[in-house]
Amino acid sequence: MLRVLTLSTLYPDRSRPGFGAFVERQTSRLAAHPGVEVKVVAAFAVPALGLGRFHPLYRDLLMLPRREQWNGLDVLRVPFPTLPKLGGRINPWSLTNRLVPMLDRLRGEFPFDVIDAEFFYPDGPAAVALGRRYGVPVSIKARGSDIHLWGGVPACRPKIVAAGQGAAGMLAVSAALREDMIALGLPGERIRVHHTGVDQAMFHPRDRTAAKAAFAVDGPLVVSAGNLIPLKGHALLIEAMAALPGVSLLIAGRGPEQPALAAQIAAAGLEDRVRLLGALPHDQLPGLFAAGDVMALPSSSEGLANVWVEALACGTPIVITDVGGARELVDRPAAGRLVARTPEGIAEGIRSVLADPKPQAEVAETAKRFTWERNSEALYEHLKGLADNAPPRSP
């Protein structure tokens, strides 16, 4: 029996059902593997000194049960204190200190063999400290912004490098991200590329006309999905729509940019063609992606975005910037276009795809290698290898 403790600051809960859903799907598949037992520590930062109870988001998080069965997994939800502006520096230390008493107790009922950290910062440094305390190997997975954002912060970069050097193994969601990790100073011989999966039974081509009708659209349609934050580039995508008359745009997601994006749409007179849908449950994304003639997401950085693969699996080509693992997906015309991160470049990429539509089945074929079965088997082999090759534990 392989006992895995999954640690993640990205994990769904009843107040944020889509938050870190890809981590939940990966973990659920691993837990279903024969000979594996998994417990999840879903940690979340809250303002120190009890200030979180005055903010609606943190108030909802603090009301979550500290332990629950969530979609078939035993999930322990652990708040840890943070401070505005200083959080990036202190979060690994704060997270570690908050987890130690809980894990000391948990070890009695669940003597975990390996710690699987699902985000590099602050999860990674905390996991390595905990691994040393309990004498178990640690794996850390890099997903993109954890390396590109936090790795660029002078106070955080040394902690990321130290965690990578202290981990028994690491995972990267794309080959390009692995190269970025090596450039940061992480040991490449311990980094394995671990592509995401997609539920091919859920994400598959559908009748596009019917799918569009569900969103009251009957002409060319661009769709997008992601957090409404500057990194995702939705403002650039909306600006590009001015050069695409007759084309509609639907954006699924929520985030701090929502008011500014709504104002931008109104100021440009695009309300009849561009709509913000808000956050959609994951089971509604297949219908959205299947409706689109194009899925566009002009991010400034990514590892290998799940929505890229999910859109392709639905038979919808993608127009994305040349970041992260983009070239590992857009490797043929049927998959879409790589574009400059400008309104003009985005518009030209969309225009090019619309002018040369490929059969949905041909587009979907580009995503066939991304399955949760393959993802789960690779993760099991990785974690099992770390546990089997770990030094004997001290009594």
Image: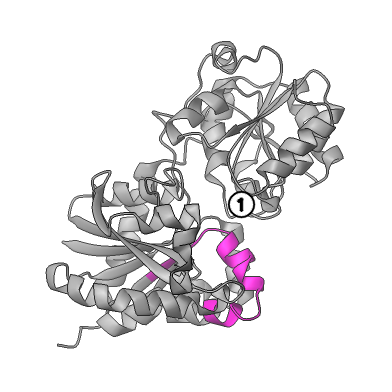
Q: Secondary structure at mark 1?
A: loop
Residue for point 76% across, 21% down: 247
Residue for point 32% across, 69% down: 115
Q: Which residue is the site of mark 1?
A: 325
Q: Which span is picked out in magenta?
A: 139-160
Instruction: Determine crowd level at label 1: few under 14, some 14-19, many 20+ residues with C-alpha closer than 10 A.
Output: many
Which residue occupies the extreme front position in the image? 54
Give the residue type at disc 1.
Gly
Q: Position of residue 136 (x, y in %)?
A: 28, 77
- Comparing 373 with 279, the one in front is 279
- Comparing 286 with 393, the one in front is 286
Q: Position of residue 209 (x, y in %)?
A: 59, 11
Q: Position of residue 230 (x, y in %)?
A: 70, 51
Q: How many marks?
A: 1
Look at the picture and state if 76 lies above or below 158: above
Along the horizontal axis of the image, is 310 left or right of 274? left
Asked which colour scheme the image uses, the reply is: one colour
Placement of the N terminus among the 4 image quadrants: bottom left
Query: From where the camera sits, is residue 234 visible?
Result: no
When asked about the image quadrant of residue 269, the answer is top right
Along the horizontal axis of the image, is 190 left or right of 228? left
Residue for point 72% across, 36% down: 262
Look at the picture and state if 281 lies above or below 1: above
* 144 in the magenta segment: yes
Q: Position of residue 160 (x, y in %)?
A: 53, 76
* 285 in the magenta segment: no
